[in-house]
Image (cartoon, helix red, strand yellow):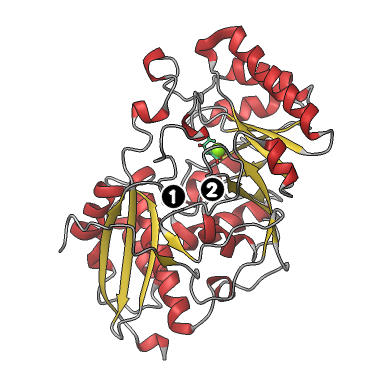
Amino acid sequence: MTTARTIRSVRAFTVRGGGADYHDQRDDHWIDDHIATPMSKYPEYRQSRQSFGINVLGTLVVEVEADDGTTGFAVTTAGEPGAYIVERHLARFVEGAPVTAIERIWDQLYSASLFYGRKGLVLNVISAIDLALWDLLGKLRREPVYALIGGAVRDEQVFYATGSRPDLARKMGFIGGKMPVRHGPAEGAEGLAATVERFAAMREEVGPDFWLMADCWMSLDLDYATRLGLGLREHGLRWIEEALPPDDYWGYAELRKRLPPDVLVTTGEHEATRWGFRLLLEMGCCDLIQPDVNWCGGLTELLKISALADSRGVLVVPHGSSVYSYHFAITRHNSPFSEFLMMHPQASEVVPMFSPLLLDEPVPVNGRLRVPDTPGFGVRLNPECALARPYEH
Ligand SMILES: C[C@H](O)[C@H](O)CC(=O)C(=O)O
Ligand SMILES: [Mg+2]
């Protein structure tokens, strides 16, 4: 009986180069080529996000082992600081607990770290522990995680693609393409015009019906976001994403009021917990929410966030997070499509999102994916990726 099993140990490893810290790429990658950020006001940090440290953390791998030797694991963006938090603080709430005590463990992880956590790195760590526990439970019960949380509501998931080439994404069968905005307010009217021109040219390439979105990665201000949203609307903008810093709930609510209803305002990938998303929903900040299951608190928390959104008729379109969100989205009526982040340097091929870290990581084919029935999340760690364990306890 699974309920008799307990957790013998939890271990925290770090690894560099892609994986969950998907911004940790080579320097010829589209994802680090002059993309607007909150640091773009400083010219020395404008060309490369790695120059200000977007990839400073690296990947955290959390492994949980049951008393029968079965192991589950999950990954997130947290690196060595995350490993420290697992091994020196949060391990005590996991080791010795029943493998089924996922809710109680989550509450202890969150409550015990409230004095220094609440969002960001600590919630990334809690997310990885939570996802590792779900992976372990699935392996012990020999069920895919999606079957543990209510089962699939559709046969397959459809995807839009994020990257520099929506024109190629359309040919690969994706339902839409999301492009990074490359110029922020510091680059003035010229930068805004360049974004509109690039979007207009892409619209010509993809035709009138293919979804085109703009990802602003927290880089704009309310006035600029309003002008950009109106400018891109002329070329069929479907949504403007993360236009403002995540704490500016008031700015998002105002942006939502200023833009016409056919331009969706979206955000959420850097938000965490049911309370953070409740604020976004109750303040009317956005039309759909985009939590990242590796950052928002894990699957246990995302199920709560999703129910909140569903009660208000709001879609939940998880930020790209590979198998960890596929098993969630396929079970939710209000998650009818998902994001796939194009991790090929030129966005010209479909490669696994957390490559090279995971083996058996599924990818969309012709823009759609059937979630495999393999137990847990159905992936294995690539033994060729050298893991370090900096804070063994
Ligand atoms: C493309 C964006 O700048 C970022 O790298 C990824 C992201 O925000 C998303 O996939 O959404
Ligand atoms: Mg985004």
Q: Please, is residue 377 above or below residue 342 in the view?
A: below
Q: Label 1: state its secondary structure.
A: loop
Q: CA distance from mark 2 to mark 1?
A: 8 Å
Q: Label 1: which residue?
A: 295
Q: Is residue 215 above or below residue 382?
A: above
Mark 2 lies on a secondary structure that is loop
Residue at numbered disc 2: 291
Q: Nearer the viewer, residue 153 or 390?
A: 390
- Residue type, label 1: Trp
Of 65 and 206, nearer the camera is 206
Position of 45 compared to 88: left or right? right
Residue 261 visible in the shown view = no
Is the C-beta separation of discs 2 and 1 under 8 Å?
A: yes
Q: Residue at x 62, y 21 (%)?
A: 225
Which sits in the foreground, 229 or 379? Answer: 379
Quadrant containing the C terminus in the rendered view = bottom left
Please state the quadrant of the image where ligand 2 appears: top right
| Residue pictured at 41% horizontal, 47% vertical | 18
Residue furthest top as drawn: 189
